């Protein structure tokens, strides 16, 4: 059975790996001339780590990154507002390392420099998976009602050489936030989320703005910004899909990852959800399975979950990014007064997913490699 996966990002490569391990003949079509990832870090929550273990690459990801068990929110002067300890560790690593691990020994043919413009012209594959990101041509063909929405916030991020003790996020005045985490091998990933619009100045000017606005924030904020060179700075609008898209169309077309449910990064769950999608699809589609009915089950299981995570991420962004003097103070008070165990159990609900949760109709299965 032949599957075509459109897009060689995290979602597409994980899908190709999952289907390839189930015996599918998989072709990945990627529009860029080279496969690779931008110079930023990524947090992989325990749900994503279970998906990666299921795909046989969890141990490699753990070796490449840094394990982080706890986190929390601080005010800009350094006082902790909330501290959360996860039941299982998350892993922080460089996106390029994740990409390399996903590609290593990939049981699929990858064709780069191959932009797909017409999904209908792809021939007679048994399965077509749109893993082509927030601007998906596959979604546009089948679900034009789903809109890319601007959250009103923007982000900067960078990877730098530095030493830090743990990580976390800090809420400051006027809706500014700073987060950081070690990513292993003496590197640290940091990000800033702030009210838009997208800045149009040079990177040096943008870095100067960050250093000025965040001056006086607790350590290591100033240290990490000082260690950043302008060319390391990435700047993006924060956008999402509303509503999340259906995840299957007709008899043989499915969506995974941002193509279906691009979400704000406030929970650090976009790629984690793409990995859940990939594993769910693979579990539901062993070689020889009836594709059409498996895709219906896939949509039934994934759409409510990704819609809930996306909604929660938006809510967190509204609270943590509150811009007004009063709303900002109220938001910080809300975080401080919420018991840590409540915050931990909300995080736990998102992070608790396991491949064993995939319900395969007619089978009480424990997927090989799935583990809690
Ligand atoms: C600031 C920020 C921070 C984030 N932090 C985290 C985090 O810490 N943890 C987390 O889990 N998530 C995080 N995310 C979300 C995460 O980056 C995305 O959810 C994830 O990368 C989506 O992967 P994807 O493969 O679905 O899509 P993409 O990464 O967008 O990949 C799509 C691929 O498809 C290719 N493509 C597009 N169109 C075509 C076409 N027509 N033909 C062929 N190929 C095509 C593209 O070139 C690309 O390679 C963050 C997002 C942002 C913006």
Image (cartoon, grey):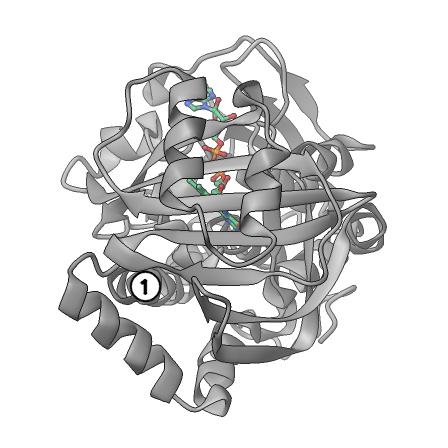
In which quadrant will I find the C terminus?
Answer: bottom right
Q: Nearer the viewer, residue 278 or 64?
A: 64
Question: Residue 74, percent across and down?
Answer: 47, 69
Q: Is residue 338 above or below residue 158?
A: below
Question: Residue 45, percent across and down?
Answer: 60, 62
Q: Is residue 256 visible?
A: no
Left or right: residue 122 compared with residue 150: right
Q: Nearer the viewer, residue 49 or 256?
A: 49
Left or right: residue 302 compared with residue 94: left
Where on the picture, by quarter, is residue 239?
A: top left
Q: Nearer the viewer, residue 371 or 74?
A: 74
Left or right: residue 59 compared with residue 331: right
Q: Tell me how many marks there are.
A: 1
Identified at 58% across, 8% down, the residue is: 33
Where on the picture, by quarter, is residue 259?
A: top left
* Residue lying farthest to the front in this orientation: 216
Q: Nearer the viewer, residue 148 or 330?
A: 330
Kind of element beneath mark 1: helix
Identified at 38% across, 15% down, the residue is: 202
Q: Which residue was labeled with disc 1? A: 320
Identified at 55% across, 57% down, the residue is: 276
In which quadrant will I find the N terminus?
Answer: top right
Question: Residue 186, percent across and down?
Answer: 80, 43
């Amino acid at each position: 059975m032949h599957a075509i996966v459109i897009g060689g990002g995290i979602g597409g490569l994980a899908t190709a790996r999952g289907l390839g391990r189930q015996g599918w003949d998989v072709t990945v079509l990627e529009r860029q001339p080279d496969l690779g990832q931008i110079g930023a870090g990524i947090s992989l929550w325990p749900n994503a780590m279970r998906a990666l273990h299921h795909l046989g690459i969890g141990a490699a990801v753990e070796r490449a990154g840094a394990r982080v068990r706890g986190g929390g929110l601080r005010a800009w002067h350094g006082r902790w507002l909330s501290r959360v300890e996860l039941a299982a560790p998350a892993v922080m690593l460089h996106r390029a390392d994740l990409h390399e691990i996903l590609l290593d020994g990939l049981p699929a043919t990858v064709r780069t420099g191959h932009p797909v413009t017409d999904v209908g012209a792809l021939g007679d594959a048994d399965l077509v998976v749109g893993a082509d990101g927030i601007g998906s041509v596959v979604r546009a063909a089948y679900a034009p009602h789903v809109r890319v929405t601007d959250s009103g916030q923007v982000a900067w991020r960078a990877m730098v050489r530095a030493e830090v003790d743990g990580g976390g996020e800090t809420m400051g005045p006027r809706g500014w936030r700073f987060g950081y985490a070690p990513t292993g091998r003496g590197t640290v990933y940091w990000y800033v989320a702030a009210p838009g619009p997208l800045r149009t100045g040079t990177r040096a000017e943008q870095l100067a703005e960050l250093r000025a606005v965040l001056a006086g924030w607790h350590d290591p904020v100033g240290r990490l910004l000082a260690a950043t060179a302008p060319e390391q700075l990435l700047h993006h609008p924060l956008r999402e899909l509303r509503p999340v898209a259906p995840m299957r169309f007709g008899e043989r077309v499915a969506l995974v990852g941002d193509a279906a449910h691009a979400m704000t990064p406030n929970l650090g769950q976009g790629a984690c959800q793409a990995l859940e999608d990939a594993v769910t699809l693979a579990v539901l589609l062993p070689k020889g399975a009836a594709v059409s009915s498996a895709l219906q089950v896939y949509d039934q299981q994934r759409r409510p979950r990704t819609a809930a995570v996306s909604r929660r991420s938006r809510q967190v962004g509204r609270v943590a990014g509150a811009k007004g003097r009063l709303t900002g103070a109220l938001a910080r008070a809300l975080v401080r007064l919420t018991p840590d165990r409540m915050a931990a159990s909300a995080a736990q609900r998102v992070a608790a997913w396991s491949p064993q949760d995939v319900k395969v109709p007619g089978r009480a299965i424990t997927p090989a490699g799935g583990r809690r």
